[in-house]
Image (tube, rainbow, N blue to C red):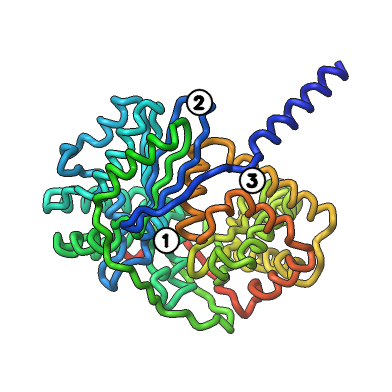
Amino acid sequence: MKRTLFLGLLMLGLGNFAFAQEVSFEEYDLPNGLHVILHQENGAPVVTTSVMYHVGGKDRTEGRTGFAHFFEHLLFEGTENIERGKWFEIVSSNGGINNANTSQDRTYYYEVFPSNNLQLGLWMESERMLHPVIDQIGVDTQQEVVKEEKRSTYDNRPYGQFLAVLGKNLFDVHPYKDPNIGYMKDIDAATLEDVKAYNKKYYVPNNAVLVVAGDFQIEETKKMIEDYFGPIPRGADIVRNYPKEKPITEQKIATAYDANIQIPAIGLAYRTPGFRERDAYVLDMISTYLSDGRSSKLYKKMVDDQKQALQVGAFNIGQEDYGMYLVFALPVGETSLEVLQTEMEEEVAKVRDELISERDYQKLQNKFENDFVNANSGVEGIANSLARYYLLYGDTNLINKEIDIYRSVTREEIKEVASKYLKPNQSVIINYLPGDKTEN
């Protein structure tokens, strides 16, 4: 039995070692500015094709919020060579899956096909970039789709507006003040001319990265990429100059209402640096220390021991220009929001004022090592990471070396960063209460 246990542990260790090995890739630019990243892994007959565009919810003019998310839907409508409504049918009938998602900073499209359909995936993404059909029928259709998504996922879902309330109260002038999905009035106001201009500006090769990951042949794939994407014209250079926020120097208190909830919530919110900054990595570790798992400080204290909270958590919400840090709780029974605020602030203060224990520090390091291994354990996740690290961080090889940043963070640095950003006078207290909400 001991021998069996030893062999099991040995195999587990070897398995982790295999998954954690360095991710190899090749990257280059086409003359039109499209950045290409290739990760060859021939262990299974599947391949991911993906395109990430450097456009998100923050890329809009006043009165036209939500355009990037709207385009996430619109660019599935069809192309000059793909009939309207046939995109998903083509993918599924060829053994593939596909999806897309949009953040405040980028939009990501991807397909996963059997490797013998790589050419199909490349052709479809080149069609999306070069030949999208953008007409009034598509605009009208997707306006209704997006509005229904907003109603079901945000407006009529318990706590669905909390993230929007967070942005509204942490930002005064930066576009992060508005929700990624936009406002109803802006979605309704979008004209065909607005939409065409937005596509011409942002959905161009020099504002995108193409990733192919999985089972393929390098030279053959390069030839297909050149054939399909090479003829796409370069767009005008994109210049971003978003207004800077003034520091928060006095604690603010905000109240918001949600007709979909019966239990109130409270959040301690802080504006933090963008995710490229080293301090943002440290804040990731602080949020994990405070609330990841049942043994974390906030959960053990407020849920298990003191029975004050139904849920409690700390989240470092990473964004390109500024981050948002949130400590959030729902009360049990008659526990007041003021009590929850006091208890949460007490735990945050401990991180500011004291070094975390060596034991907790090692647990943190183990958790981030494990997350690093899992993130790179499949070609679909690797494709996403390669695109994100290149487009948003400017360093594709972070896929291999980002863990070294976490490894280098010290207990002293955790205390220093908490003291720098998580102070009461730099916070916004958000009381999120049951009641009528304002339609937007």
Q: Which mark is residue 372?
A: 3
Looking at the image, residue 163 lies above or below residue 144: below
Q: Nearer the viewer, mark 3 or mark 2?
A: 2
Residue placed under numbered mark 2 in the picture: 44
* Residue occupying the point 47% across, 34% down: 214
Mark 3: secondary structure: helix
Between disc 2 and disc 1, the foreground one is 2
Q: Earlier in the sequence, mark 3 or mark 2?
A: 2
Q: Secondary structure at mark 1?
A: loop
Q: Which mark is residue 239?
A: none
Residue labelled with disc 1 = 105
Amino acid type of disc 2?
A: Ala
* Amino acid type of the residue tagged 3 in the rendering: Phe
- Quadrant where the C terminus lies? bottom left
- The residue lying toward the viewer, choosing from 233 and 94, is 233
The structure residue drawn at horizontal position 30% and vertical position 65%, both measured from the top left corner, is: 65
Residue nearer the viewer, 362 or 51: 51
Q: Are marks 3 and 1 in contact (CB under 8 Å)?
A: no
**55 or 265: nearer the eye?**
55
Please name the residue shown 11% across and 53% down the image.
136
The answer to whether residue 190 is left or right of residue 318 is left
Q: Secondary structure at mark 2?
A: loop
Question: In the rendered structure, which disc, 3 or 1, sits on the residue that comes first in sequence?
Answer: 1
Visible residue check, residue 312: yes
Quadrant into which the N terminus falls:
top right
State how far apart marks 2 and 1 are (Cα): 32 Å
Query: Reading the chain from its start, which is encountered first: label 2 or label 1?
Result: 2
Residues marked 3 and 2 touching at CB (< 8 Å) = no
Residue type (three-letter) at the residue carrying disc 1: Asp
Residue 155 visible to the viewer: no
Distance from the alpha carbon under mark 3 to that under mark 2: 21 Å
Q: Residue 125 sits in which quadrant?
A: top left
